[in-house]
Amino acid sequence: MDSRGIAVTGMGCICAAGHDVDSTLRSIYSGKRNPVPPSRLQVNLDKVYPVFEVADDLKDIASDANRTTKLAIVVAEEALRQAGVDAEVVRNKRIGVCMGTTVGCTLSNEPFYRAFKEGSKPDLAPIHRYLINNPAEYIARRYGFHGPVSTIANACSSGTDAIGMAKGWIQNGRCDIAIAGGVDALSRITYLGFISLLISSTGACRPFDVDRTGLNLGEGAGIVVLEHPDSAKERGVETFAECVGFGCNADSYHPTAPHPEGVGLINAIRRALHEAEIEASDIGFVNAHGTSTPDNDKTEGKVIDKIYRPGIPAVSTKSYTGHTLGAAGGLEAIFTIRSLMDGLIPLTAGFENVDPECGIAPTTQLTKTDARCAISHSLAFGGNNSALIFRRSRS
Amino acid sequence: MRFSILGIGPVCALGSGMESFSAGIRGEREPRIERMTIESSAGTIELPVYQPVIERMSEFIKPRELRRLDGFSRMALLSAYMAVEDAGIEFTDPSRVGIIFGSGHGPVRTTFRFLDSYIEDGDKVASPLHFVNSVHNAVSSQTSIFMGIQGPCQTISCFGHTASAVLSAASDWLNTGLVDYVLAGLGDEYCDLMGYSLGSMKAHPAKEMHPEIFDKCSFLPGEGHVTFLLARDDTPGRAVITDAQLRANPDEVLLHDNVILSANGDPETGNVYAKLAARSKSHRIFTNKWGGMPTAIGFDLAAASLSDDLPVSCCEACGNGEVNVYTVSK
């Protein structure tokens, strides 16, 4: 195994805060956010649970793709363009695709299922569409990539896990370049599901705040182009950062609640630090999972307080994107990298008052940083915990 | 790709556990096939479906603990316990054990039960229990919780690439020293909507599977889960996976004398298997013992590990005219 850091040579993102990486970061650094009642989901509820929507209907993107896949295509185009991956590179390099998602690989078309239940014998077009819309498979087919293909369905840590797995592919010689990240569109299934669990908020989310009442769902996609450092050097492309550490560990505790002491998260962070060959004190800031649910923020806050140096800056960028589920890890990896590059950590919108049970105060203003390394956390249903460490490129 | 298979827990139409599975491979046990009546767009049809035979569940999981689990999780968990039992080992450090499960479609019955909850009773009363069990990683998470495993825990869902992604990750985890053992599981379940879709695509589905006929549709759906307990290749076990050729050209792939084809009566992939059959000295097909599912190669690998004539090349069409070939050796 090659233990060097893996080069990040391209990034692409779309979310409620922006339609590409630059516009998203400009918006996030401004501290503004825009949770709205869901405009594309028709629901019959007594209360409104706001979401973070991507404004664009994406009508001009691939007519055979569903909304989740369209989001992935938009960001793949941006990331591949930035990384200079053209037809010649596709011919000469083994390129893999590893995508995280929750709804993107689920057989769950509701209108089709309703018609089936009613016995009206619906046309099979939605089934055919489902069969060609697995996110990683679709991207690999669209661009003619011949490397490994995997869609990770590990709930809310899927995007982080996808980047971690792709990093391993490159280190273990399975491919030269990997397109990795996460994607999810808003859906009635996840919207009603999170409301049924009583962890969605009727107001804008407030990560780590003592008065937080739950999460807001969001949609989007975030993809990084990972590349073996020798390949990046040979192609003469810019390395924006290096992915130097990944850890993933189960709590083995509860199907929906995190372990109260964050056992799995601590193990995942330690594993990522070990892989990066650095100490916790070398971490300059934390991009927290920070969903704004009572349980997540309490556990994660305790772990941040315990593991890292006192007062380490921690931000929850979900306060700008909502919880984008499978996309979250991809988006937050990009925000972490850009914060390292820009020397700026966003403020955590919605946070006002410290929760003593969390034990931390996230950023309350746009904060300058000269950090070399930063970490992004993800916690998922089922008690999965993942962490990615990025190092700013010297160039 | 390189690792040792220490234990196997198959749960399929032949039964649960290696004893039932071996008997089925030898032809001493017939698969359980239920004939479903489907109101398809082509009219009322009868669709034979391979259904798992669940055995010995109560030896591993208390009945009251089962109440929290849906059928897919129960099947996978039984399979995982049986793989560990088959290996005859106990885990001493739960953080040194990883779990990686893959499924082509995931827990589809529970997904539709969740939809039923709000379609029938309204959006306000969507079922939280069904929602939690409907996420793809519920199965691997429940396994980590029940078995006390705290290593990496991942779930893959990528149709024909599912098995290769699961086994590649397991191999990497073991060979980089991340963990000492991996529970690698592959499985799928059947649901009524799949039956409707299959019945509507093919007005007259086959009465029985004939996967050895590559150009004629005889696909019948199956349901099952197989878990492998894996360790590094220097650990003695049932068999060793010594190599994998992934996304390979069927005209160029290297084959051993003994070949197992995961052909399933789907003519869309039949030409891949026809090429492989033509190039192999000797090939066998077992899919008509457990039915068609995206992760059926798992059962082929289990069958290969029972072979007296190793090495065996196990082949699965993975889409786009490509094939994954796994070498199972002594």
Image (cartoon, grey):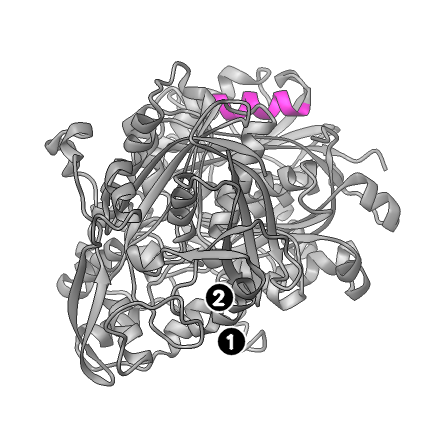
Q: Can residue A350 be seen in this view?
A: yes
| SS under mark 1 | loop
Left/right of residue B14 with respect to residue A284 in the rendered view: left
Q: In the rendered structure, which amino acid carries the disc numbered 2?
A: Asn
Q: Crowding at label 1, few (<14), some or many (≥20) Cα neighbours within 10 Å?
A: few
Q: Crowding at label 2, few (<14), some or many (≥20) Cα neighbours within 10 Å?
A: many
- Give coordinates of residue A357: x percent, y percent: 37, 21
The quadrant where residue B172 appears: top right
Q: What label does residue B57 carry, if any? A: none
Q: Residue at the spot x=69%, y=41% of the render?
A: A170
| SS under mark 2 | loop
Q: In the rendered structure, which amino acid carries the disc numbered 1?
A: Asp
Q: What label does residue A133 carry, if any? A: 2
Was residue A272 drawn as part of the magenta stretch in this picture?
A: yes
- Considering only order in the chain, which callout, 1 or 2, is on the residue closer to the N terminus? 1
- Give coordinates of residue B234: x percent, y percent: 55, 23
The span from disc 2 to disc 1 (Cα, nearest Å) is: 8 Å
Q: In this view, does A194 lie above or below A280?
A: below
Q: Do the residues labelled 2 and 1 touch (CB within 8 Å)?
A: yes
Chain hosting mark 2: A
Q: In front: A333, or A198?
A: A333
Which secondary structure class fits the magenta region best?
A: helix
Q: Mark 1 — residue?
A: A64
- The image quadrant where one finds the N terminus of chain A is top right
Which region of the structure is painted magenta? Answer: A266-276
Q: In this view, does A287 lie above or below A359?
A: below
Q: In front: A200, or A390?
A: A390
The residue positioned farthest toward the left in the image shown: B64
- Give coordinates of residue A228: x percent, y percent: 76, 41
Q: Residue at the spot x=50%, y=18% of the render?
A: A305
Q: In front: B8, or A118?
A: B8
